[in-house]
Image (cartoon, coloured by chain):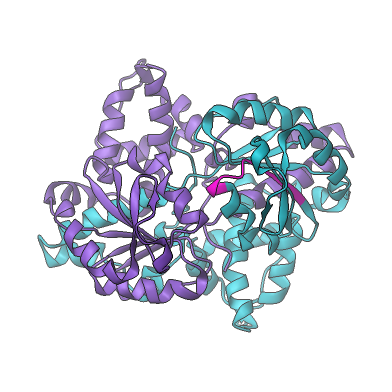
Chain colours: A cyan, B purple
Amino acid sequence: MATGRTHRPATRSRGIPEATVARLPLYLRALTALSERSVPTVSSEELAAAAGVNSAKLRKDFSYLGSYGTRGVGYDVEYLVYQISRELGLTQDWPVVIVGIGNLGAALANYGGFASRGFRVAALIDADPAMAGKPVAGLPVRHTDELESIIRDNGVSIGVIATPAGAAQQVCDRLVAAGITSILNFAPTVLSVPDGVDVRKVDLSIELQILAFHEQRKAGEESGPAAAAAARPGTPARASAPAAGGGKGPEGDVPAVMPA
Amino acid sequence: MATGRTHRPATRSRGIPEATVARLPLYLRALTALSERSVPTVSSEELAAAAGVNSAKLRKDFSYLGSYGTRGVGYDVEYLVYQISRELGLTQDWPVVIVGIGNLGAALANYGGFASRGFRVAALIDADPAMAGKPVAGLPVRHTDELESIIRDNGVSIGVIATPAGAAQQVCDRLVAAGITSILNFAPTVLSVPDGVDVRKVDLSIELQILAFHEQRKAGEESGPAAAAAARPGTPARASAPAAGGGKGPEGDVPAVMPA
């Protein structure tokens, strides 16, 4: 995968804790929002609030990037967007294949959030011969038979699995055998992969579970104003905070996992 | 929303930090996996590893539930599943509506992870009259005109927005006006809501960003075995860990947020 063969970022990255890496996309999201509103600088407190992380942790995280901000001015938004994107490797082109073009696969193919982060959908692959050739999100669906050649020809290193649970492991095995070393799994199953292959899962119900907790709490508020004050979001900004905002405490990062 | 009007859980919940709440679904996922394999008990270390949280944090989190495990035996899996589900309010029935039945909305309607967590899809709503009445995931799609009555008649308190970005705020406003107090937003836009309404967002690209970082790192490994040892996942279990496993450090929870 020629796309990844630059040594500088990896070298720079070795010192960064995994937990910091996991928060970088959060900061990037918040910074991108500021950038789109042409906000030139942001304080660690403002950015931490937007990212749902506490500000001391944010400053520590940014220190790994060598970014310390300017006292009284804050952080330069554009430069931080660049720094974090570079650190995450998003300044590179990452061709990805999506396997399983049902509703979810099609939704992912149409999902703007991938391309905007450097993830180029190189191919859509489905096992159904009837799907082959059909255009989805402007790409003709390819048959699973072509999986290996598609990955080789496009230098794909990241595979997205959106198949039914029953097909996921077999697809995973083929992706890995074809050289894929990172897999994003949307299938409701646990995949086993060899050492050296990263598998990450997205759960679509985790956020609902957090919301359920708050709904339950809101119902409880009716029992007393003190409880209400304790439980009700303090500001509209908080109420409309992204998922990370659900962690209103200093460590309130919200992991995305599958229901097993 | 009669479903949420039980006071006991909310009362019990007041003492639990937001960050702990955010980790409960992680523990639940890992415990459910153990339960499905008929594992009766689990140590805090095993469960922490499966959930991608450090064991000290896990023990602290469980202490809020009044669950301390048994020395030398660990935690009772079934009881913990019950405790956490109850704490999150998942032992209740949570009717949800999904608005916007494109590929994503349809994928969500078919998503098994909702029902298994107590989230019952009460109705699918779309603005396209041509969609009205069409069955999706066994439910006839309803027209947006019926949104208010559907919410009222079903006691819905949680709305899922899967519309295009341009329609999301208007749909959000109608949901809130109709009494919805929790919104899960899949639309690529920032929603503003009044105080007291919780909005959470799911990002489908965050996990890819974490994978990109690791891909970049793997490429960098080629520059030296030490780096490789440092970067390569230590065990298959880790390699196939859920998203939370991406946080291999004690604070490595992976939030799910939208790219703004």
Residue A78 in sight in this render: yes
Residue shown at 70%/43% (left/top)? A132
Q: Quadrant of residue B148?
A: bottom left
Q: Is residue A156 above or below residue B172?
A: above
Which portion, as a residue range, is magenta? A95-104
Residue shown at 49%/38% (left/top)? B53
Q: Position of residue A15 (x, y in %)?
A: 73, 48
Q: Quadrant of residue A175?
A: top right
Q: Nearer the viewer, residue A94 or B39?
A: A94
Q: Position of residue A29 (x, y in %)?
A: 59, 65
Examine the structure image and report whether residue A240 is included in the region drawn in magenta: no
Q: Is residue A236 above or below residue A105?
A: below
Examine the structure image and report whether residue A100 is included in the region drawn in magenta: yes
Residue A251 in sight in this render: no
Residue shown at 78%/61% (left/top)? A91
Q: Is residue B183 above or below residue A42?
A: above
Q: Position of residue A227 (x, y in %)?
A: 17, 61
Residue shown at 32%/36% (left/top)? B62
